[in-house]
C-alpha cells in the first residue's frame, strides 16, 4: 500500500492500483478515536461520503463496511447496522443483521453502502472504499 498523505489527522492508504482507500488514525471530522472505528452512538447525524474529509475527486459514491465485532461473540451480543445501499431510494433501509456482521467480522462486507443511518445502528464498524 502506498501512503497518499495525511489530512485532518488521518492517514489515507491506497493500494498499488489506486483503488482502495482505508482510514487509519484519528479523524476529527467524524469525532472518532485513534483506531478509525466509527461508533454511531457518538454521532449527531447519518454517516455518508460527503463527511469523509477528502476532496471531491477522491470522494467515493459508496463504501464498504468492516464489522468491528468479536467473531466468537453470541448473536445476542452483536448489534445491527442500518444502511442505505447504492441504488436504493433515500427512504429505503437495509439492515445488516448480527448474523451477517459475525460472518464478515473484520472483513469488508460485499454491500455497496451509500449511507449509515444513525437511528437504529447499534454496532461499530470501520470503512474502506
Image: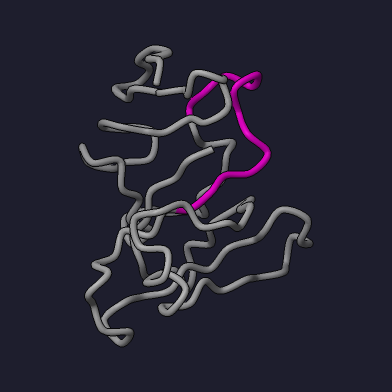
Q: Is 63 colored magenta in this rendering?
A: yes
**Residue at the (48%, 30%) spot, across then down:** 21
- As drawn, 9 above or below 36: above
**Residue at the (57%, 19%) spot, across then down:** 55
Task: Give the number of marks.
Answer: 0
Q: Quadrant of the N terminus?
A: top left
Q: Position of residue 93 (x, y in %)?
A: 65, 70
Which residues lie in the magenta part? 53-65
Q: Is residue 128 left or right of residue 76?
A: right
Observer-nearest of 36 and 20: 20
Q: Residue furthest bottom?
A: 76
Q: Is 115 colored magenta in this rendering?
A: no
Q: Residue furthest front?
A: 16
Instruction: Please identify the dominant SS of the magenta region.
Output: loop
Q: Position of residue 83 (x, y in %)?
A: 58, 63
**Residue at the (40%, 23%) spot, across then down:** 12
- As drawn, 6 above or below 54: above
Observer-nearest of 56 and 63: 63
Q: Is residue 5 left or right of residue 89?
A: left
Amino acid at each position: 500500500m502506498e501512503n497518499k498523505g495525511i489530512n485532518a489527522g488521518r492517514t489515507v492508504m491506497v493500494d498499488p492500483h489506486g483503488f482502495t482507500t482505508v482510514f487509519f488514525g484519528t479523524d476529527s471530522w467524524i469525532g472518532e478515536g485513534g483506531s478509525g472505528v466509527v461508533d454511531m452512538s457518538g454521532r449527531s447525524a447519518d454517516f455518508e461520503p460527503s463527511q469523509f474529509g477528502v476532496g471531491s475527486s477522491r470522494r467515493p459514491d459508496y463504501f464498504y463496511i468492516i464489522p468491528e465485532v468479536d467473531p466468537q461473540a453470541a448473536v445476542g451480543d452483536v448489534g445491527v447496522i442500518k444502511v442505505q445501499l447504492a441504488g436504493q431510494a433515500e427512504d429505503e433501509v437495509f439492515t445488516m443483521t448480527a448474523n451477517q456482521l459475525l460472518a464478515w467480522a473484520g472483513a469488508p462486507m460485499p454491500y455497496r453502502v451509500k449511507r449509515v443511518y444513525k437511528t437504529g445502528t447499534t454496532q461499530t464498524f470501520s470503512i474502506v472504499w
